[in-house]
Image (spheres, coloured by chain):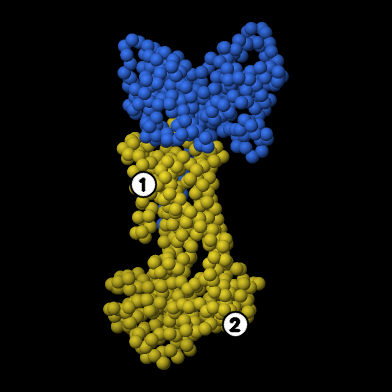
Chain colours: A blue, B yellow
Amino acid sequence: MKILSTISLFIFGVVVVSILTAGLVFYQNNKTNQVSNSQTGSKVADTLNQLTASGKSIVLNMTEISKHNSQSSCWILINGKIYDVTSYFGSHPGGNSTMAATCGTDATVAYATRDPYASSAVGGSGHSSSAKNLLNDYYIGDLNQTIGQVTLPEINSTIPSVNNVISNTTNNPTTPKAVLPSVTPSGNISLNMTEISKHNKASDCWFIVSNKVYNITSFFGSHPGGSAVMAATCGTDATVAYMTQNPNASSSAGSSAHSSRATNMLSSYFIGNFNQVIGQQAVAQTNSVVAPTSNNGNDSEEDD
Amino acid sequence: MFIIFILSFIPVVIWALIEPLASRFMDFSSSATSLGQIFGLVGMVLFSINLILAGRFKFLDKYFKGLDKVYAHHSRIGSIAFSMLLFHPIFLVIRYLLISTQDAALFFVPFINMPVTWGIISLFMMIVLLSVTFYIKLKYHIWKMSHKFMLLSFFFASLHTFFIYSDISRSSLLRFYVLLFTMTGLFVGIRKTFFSKFLVSKFEYKVKNTIQLNKDILEIEMEPVSNKMNFKSGQFAFFSFISGGVTPESHPFSISSASVDNNIKITVKNLGDYTSLLVGLKPNDGVLIDGPYGHFSYQNFKSKNQIWIAGGIGITPFLSMARVLESEYNIDMYYSVKENSEAVYLKDFEDISLKNPNFKFNLWDASLKGYINSGLVVNLSKGFADKDIFLCGPPMFMESLKNQFVVLGVDIKKIHYENFSF
C-alpha cells in the first residue's frame, strides 16, 4: 500500500512540476512579446493612432474622465492608469452593472475588491491575473497625461463582430465540418426568439447571453462543465445560466460566473445581437468556429 | 472492508445517474474529467471513513475484531484515498492541457479561484503529512502530533468539495450523501482531537508503584481513583500519564495483570523512546486509561486446545490470560527470549503451571536453542489439529511465525495476533 502511494506521489510530482514549468516558460515568452508591443492596449490602439493624427489633444484629468461616465462611453481610473472599457461591456464576467457603476470614476478600490461599493481594498478578493492582462488592452494613458483628441465612435469598434469571426475562420485551416442550420432561402434572418428557439439541440445550438446571440454548436465536447449543462440552454436566453454556471438557476445572485477566459472564447461564437437582422452567409460561417486555441499572435496576448 | 467498498461505490452510482454516461465519456477529455470526478468523490468518502476509523471507537474494535485491525484498515484505506486524491487533479487537468499548457499550469496555481485553492491547500498538506508518515521515522509522539493536522487537510478538502461547482453542487442526493460522510468525519476528528478530554470517557487511575524487573523491563502498577476498568485478560488500553517527566500523549499497552485484580499492571520494555521516560513515574502520578480494546483473548475462540507463543515483551497479554485461565483449557505456552536474563515473570508462570497441569510452560532461550520455529512447536505440541495459535511479540517475529504456520497447513483463521505498530 505504501508502494501505491509512492507511485501515485511520483506521478503527481512529475505531472505537476512539468506542467507548471511548461506553463511558466510559455508565460515568460508571452510576457516578453507583450513588452515588445506598443505601450498602449491593443483594444484601443486604433483610437490612439487617430488621436495622434488628429492634432487635437486632451488632458486625461479627473474632469475629462468624469465625462465618460456611461455604458456608451466608459473610462475608468485604476492605479493611476486610465482605461477605456466601453467595448468590454457585455463581456465582463461580473456583469455590466458592477462595471457601469464605476464609469467616469477612480475604480481602483472597486477593481481590487470586485465590489463597486467597497470603501477600502482591505479584505477584498481582486481580479485574476488574466483579467489584469485583459485590462491592459484597454489602456489609453496615465492620469494627467496629454493625448490627442479622439472621435468617440471609433473607440468603441472593438466588439467582436461577424467580420472578426469570418477572418478567424479563414486564418484557421483546421476547422471542423460545418453543420448548417435550417435558414430560409430569403438570405436574411432575424435573430429573434422564434428563430433562436429553433436551434435547441446539441447538434444545432444557439443561445442568448446578455442580449448577444451565439451559435455554440461546435463547442460541444469542449465545455469543461460537461455537455449536458450546456445542452439544457440551447434555444433559450442563457444569460443567467452562463452567469451562474448553473442551467437551472433562477437568478444570478450569489453564484460563481464563467471566467473571463471563457467569455473571450464565447465571443468567437457570436452571430449577432438579439433582434438584429443578419445575412445567412454569416450564420453559416459561425458554425465552423472552433475554440480560439490556435489563433494568431493577436489573440494569444489576451489569453494570459 | 467489503462494507467500506460498498459505501465508497454508492456515490459513483449516484454520479452515474445524474447525467447519461454517454455524455460523460463522449471523448478523451470528457472521460478524463469524469475519471477525475470519480476519483475525487471516492477519495473524499474514503478520507471521511478513515477519520471515523481513527476515532478509536469500541464498536469498530468489536466489528473488526481488534483495534489493531481497525488501524491496519486505516493505513490501507488512507493509502488508497491519498492515491485517488492525487490522481483527481491529474485527470482533471487533462482537459486544460488540451487547450494550452498555460491553462493547465494555471489550474495548479493557488489563489485564483477560492474553491480550487482550498483543494490545493488540502492536497499540499496531505502530501507533506503523509510523506512524513511514509518516509520519515519520527518519534511516535511527534508523528502523532503531525498526523493530527490531517484533520485540517480534511477540513479544506470538505470546503473544496462543497464550494466547487460540480455534480455535488448540482445533485442534492449526491450532496447529501457526501455531506453525511464529511460531517461525520469532521465531527469524529474534532471530537478526538480537541474534545477527547471531555467527550471520551476515560478511567482515572493513579500510579501505585513501579518495579524494575530487569535492566530493560519496568512494571507499572496503577490503582483506580474511582471506577475500575473492566476488561478481558489479553486486552490492551491506551495510557496517558500525567507526570512531570513523561509526555502526555496516550500510548497503547497490553495489560499484564489479571482481569479479576483490582489494580492494573502494565509491563513496559525500554525501547529508548517514550518508554524510557516511564522510569521517572512516581507513586500518585495521575493516569488516564482509554480502553479496553482488542480481540486477543483466549476466551474469544472456541477451541480449548491452544498454543501460545510470546516473543520478548510480547509475554504481557499471556501473563494476564494465564492468571485467570480455567483448568478445562489445554495450553502449550512458549516464551521465546534472546537470552535467559531477558525473561521476566518466570516465577509466576511456574506457580501457574504447578497449580494447573493443563498449562505447560516452555521457556525458549534462543541463545541456546536457536530461534523458535513452527516445526519445533508442532513437534513439541504434537500437531496443530483444532488448536488456536496465539502470537505476540515483535512484528517480524509474528510475521515470520505466522507464515511458517500457514506453510505447514494451519488455517489462517486459527492464528491470532495483534500488531502494535500504530
Q: Quarter of the image containing the N terminus of chain A?
A: bottom left
Element type at marker 2? strand
At 44% from the left edge and 78% from the top edge, which residue is drawn?
B232
What is the chain letter for disc 2?
B
Please tell me how crowded label 2 is: few (under 14), some (14-19), or many (20+) other residues with Cα within 10 Å.
Answer: some
Q: Is residue B40 visible?
A: no
What's the amino acid at mark 2? Asn
- In the rendered structure, the answer to whether residue B244 lies left or right of residue B126 reads right
Nearer to us in this view, A242 or A9? A242
The one of A81 and B6 positioned closer to us in this rendering: B6
Q: Position of residue B195 (x, y in %)?
A: 56, 62
> Is the residue marked by circle 1 packed among few (<14), some (14-19), or many (20+) residues within 10 Å?
some
Along the line of sight, the residue nearer the viewer: B40 or B192: B192
Q: Report the Cα–Cα distance between label 1 and label 2.
A: 59 Å
Q: Earlier in the sequence, mark 1 or mark 2?
A: 1
Residue A33 position, x and y percent, is 56, 24
- Identified by mark 1, the residue type is Ile
Instruction: Tell me where residue B63 sits by quadrant.
Output: bottom left
Q: Which mark is residue B14?
A: 1
Q: How many marks?
A: 2
Quadrant in the rendering for residue B77? bottom left
Residue designated by label 2: B209
Q: Are marks 1 and 2 in contact (CB under 8 Å)?
A: no
